Amino acid sequence: MQLEKIISISGKPGLYKLISQLKNGFIIEDVVSKKKVSIGNTSQVSLLDNIAMFTFDKEVPLFEVFENVAKNYDYKEAISHKSSDAELRDFMAQSLPDYDTERVYVSDIKKLAQWYNILSKAGYITPESFVKAEVPAEEKTEDQPAEVTEKKTAKKTAPKTEKTAAPKVKASTSSAKGTPKSTHRKMG
């Protein structure tokens, strides 16, 4: 899924796409309204590409969960994030059956449903959006499967990130290199 530049900004509703870099910030575009605005380096930013959800035995990248939701809802909008807690937990159990019920909170499920519906409304949720990009043959190695090579290639184009194991840490931008830095967030 080609969404490595989709971000959530603390204190701002909705999702945004990084468009370009400024001297002391970035130009972003609302994924639904396509309205462009600038943000400063001090904004707390979370790259959706760096968010994962806890299961009992591993962490599942958010986009894999989006793909499960898309298949369950025939690539259309899912339940509302304003649904009851019981409905949201049922939605989560259908989307990620082995999710860690103690570490994934209802607030995380609400965010998942809300973000999925925003991306669906903006036209990002299609069967084609979940097809992995082809990697040129010269970048593949004999001892590495294509999936590993694809992940390394995707990281070359994605903004630099620091990864920590701490869940629920808000990301922030850095003015040192002019690229957004974020912590690896876990939902739950």
Image (cartoon, rainbow, N blue to C red):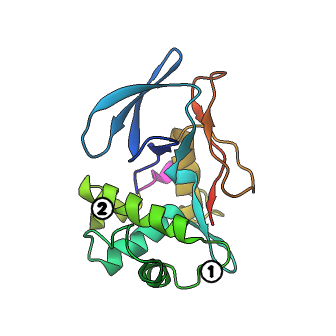
Answer yes or no: is residue 131 visible. no
- Residue with the mark numbered 2: 125
Instruction: Give the image location of residue 76, x and y in percent.
Output: 25, 70
Q: Position of residue 101 (x, y in %)?
A: 62, 80
Q: CA distance from mark 1 to mark 2?
A: 26 Å
Relative height, residue 112 to residue 123 (above, below) = below
* Residue 44, position as x, y percentages in the image: 57, 37
Q: Nearer the viewer, residue 58 or 93?
A: 93
Q: Where residue 144 appears, x then y in whole percent?
A: 63, 62
Q: Is residue 142 left or right of residue 110?
A: right
Q: Nearer the viewer, residue 163 or 185?
A: 185
For marks 1 and 2 on the same chain, the one whose residue lies earlier in the sequence:
1
Numbered tag placed on residue 101 in the rendering: 1
Near mark 1 (Cα within 10 A), the count class, few <14, some 14-19 or many ≥20, is: some
Is 107 situated left or right of 182 in this image?
A: left
Asked whether 164 or 127 is in front, the reply is 164
Label 1 element class: loop
Neighbor class of circle 2 (other Cα within 10 Å; few <14, some 14-19, many 20+) is many
Q: Quadrant of the N terminus?
A: bottom left
1 and 2 marks in contact (CB < 8 Å): no
- Is residue 179 in view? yes
The numbered dot on residue 126 is none
The boundaries of the magenta stretch are 134-138
Residue mark closest to the camera, 1 vs 2: 1
Q: Is residue 29 magenta?
A: no
What residue appears at the point 66 percent right and 46 percent down from the top-left corner?
183
